[in-house]
Amino acid sequence: MLRLLIVDDEVDICDFVKSFFKDRNFEVFTANNGKQAVDMVKSEKPEIVLMDIRMPVMDGMEALKEIRKLDGAIKVIMITAIEDEKKAEEAKHHGAIEYITKPLLLEQLERTVFTIAEQIKMNS
Amino acid sequence: MSYDDNWLRLQDWIVEKMKNCDGALIPTGSGSVQMRQEPELDYQYFLENASRTMIRFRKPEHLIRMIVRVIDEQVKVSHTAMLLYKEERDSFILIDSKGGEGVKLPIGFIRMTFDNPLIRLFNERHNFKISEIGAIEYKELLDVIQRDEEVKKNKDLVELMELSIRQMELLKANICIPIYYKKDLMGIFVLGKKLSNMKFSRQEVGFFTTLANDVAMAIANAQLIQDLQEKIFEVHELYEREHQVFIHTAISLAAAIDARDPYTHGHTERVTKYALAIAEELEDIPEAQAYRNFRETLHISALLHDVGKIGVPDSILKKKGQLTREEYEMVKEHSLTGAAILYPIRELGDIAKEVRAHHEMYDGGGYPDGLKGEEIPFIARIISVSDTFDAITSDRPYRQKKMAEIAVQIIKDNSGSQFDPIVVSAFLLAYRKGKLGNNT
C-alpha cells in the first residue's frame, strides 16, 4: 500500500482528501503546516505528498525544499489557491512534480496521483 | 434599513417560521413525523414571505449561507453544502458548507464541470424523467438502478446513475437538490443524512426544492440588480466623461479667443466666474428652473459668449485708439458670428441663442435683434451684467480702468434700462458677499 501525506492548514480539506484516498487504498497521513510535514516525512516516509503553499509556521515552498533534501525520490504535488505561473515554476524548480490550483477537479487529482502511483510501482 | 438589519431580521424570521410552520421539518423523538392539518398552506405562507425577503438581498451568497446555516440548525442533518455555478471558472464550486468534524465538506476546494456525472444527471434529467420533484436521493437512485426495468434497458443512463452515486458518496450526500433558473442548472444543494436517521419526508424534499427555486430567483434578481447598477454607473461615467470633454473643449475655445486679444486677457474666464456667482443667487427662480440644466447651460454659454470674436480682424481687436463707426459695427457682428458658429452643433443649439443675445438690452436698445425684457434669454441677461462688470473693471484699449465701486454704480443706474432688475439685484447680492473676486 502506497503512503500518501496530505499537508493543509485547513482541517476540513485534510479530512476530505484523507477519506478520498483511503477509499482508494492508500495509507494516508495528514499535517497542518510545513514543519509538521517535514517531521512526517522523516517518521512515516510517504512516497507521495500533496502540499498546500500558504500555511502558518512553515509554508509549502519551504517544506518542499526541506523534504526534497531528505528524500530525492519523493513525489510532491503542490495544491494551492495561488494562481501564479512564477510560483508554479518555482515549485517545479524545487522538485515538485505537479502544481494544481484550487478549486480543483477531483478526477484530475485522482488521475494525477494514480499516474504517479503507477510509476512508483513500476520502478520498485 | 441596512443590509445587516435585513439579514438578521430574515434569519430570525426563518427560524421562527421553521419552528411554527410545519412539524414535518422537525422530526419528533418517537420516530413519527408530526404534522398539522394544513401543512401546505403554512409552507406557502413561509415561502411567499421568504422569497419576498430574498429579493432584498443584494449578495445572494450571503442569503445562501444563511439558508444553509438555518437548515443545518433546524433540520438536524449531518452536513449541508451548496454548489454554485461560477461563470469565471465555468464550473460548480462549493461555496458554503456546514457540518460536524469529519463530515463537513471543505469550502472552495473542489469544483465540478459540466462533464461531472452528477451535474450531467441534473442537467440532462429531463431526458430521463428520474424524479418528479427534481431532487435525487441516494437510496432512491440505487433502487432505481436495481429495480426499474425501464431504466435498466438504458445502458447510458445506468452508467450515468452509477457514476452519480459515486459523486454523491464523495459529497457524503443523502439528497441532492438542483437549483434551476429557467432551464439552467445554477447550483446543487447537498444534504447529508438526518441525525435522527429518519428518511427525508416527501414534504421536506418538496420544501427544499421550492426553497432551491427561490434561491435561484434571488440569485437571478441579485444578478439583475447588479447588472443594472453597473449599467447605470457606466452611463453616468460616460455622461461625466463626455461632459468633462465638452467643458474642456469650451474652455480651450474660450482660451483661444482670449489669447487673440491681449488687452482683454482672462476676460472670458472672469465673465464666466461672475456669471456663475450671480447665477448662484438666482437658481431658485422660475426663469432659472425653466432651463433643463441651468448651471451647465450658463457655464458653457459664458465660456463661449465671445467665440464670435474669431471673425473680428486683429487690426480692430488689437487697436489701441478709439474705434471708428465701421470698426465698431464689425465688433458688434461677433454675437451673430458666435451664434452662427454654435448653432449647427446640436448640443449647443440653446447656447447659441444665449450667445446671440448677450448684447441685448432690457429696454430693447441692444443688438443684434433689439429684443426687450423677457424676450431676451435669461442667461444672456446674466452674461450681459457680468460682461459689463468686467469691461469696466479691467483694462481695455478704449477705456481706462475704473474701480469696481464705479462699475457697481453704473450697473445699478442702468437696472431696468440696460439690465434686468432681477439680475442686477442678484449681482449686488453676490458682490456684497465678495463672490465677484479680485476686482471687488
Image (cartoon, grey):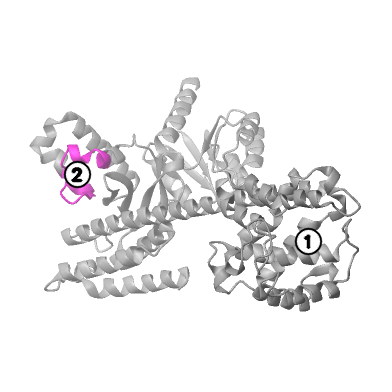
| Residue ID at (61%, 42%) | A60
In this rendering, position of residue A76 left or right of residue B30: right
| Mark closest to the chain's N terminus, 1 or 2 | 2
- Residue reaching furthest to the top: A122
User: Start and end of the magenta stretch?
Assistant: B121-143
- Check the residue under mark 1 and report the chain it is in: B
- Residue reaching furthest to the front: B325
Residue behind mark 2: B141
In this rendering, position of residue A27 left or right of residue B384: left
For label 2, the SS is helix
Q: Is residue B69 above or below residue A61?
A: below
Residue B293: which quarter of the image?
Answer: bottom right
Q: Which mark is residue B270?
A: 1
Residue type of the residue flagged with mark 2: Leu
Residue type of the residue flagged with mark 1: Arg
Q: In this view, does B153 lie above or below B147?
A: above
Residue B98 drawn at (x, y percent):
39, 59
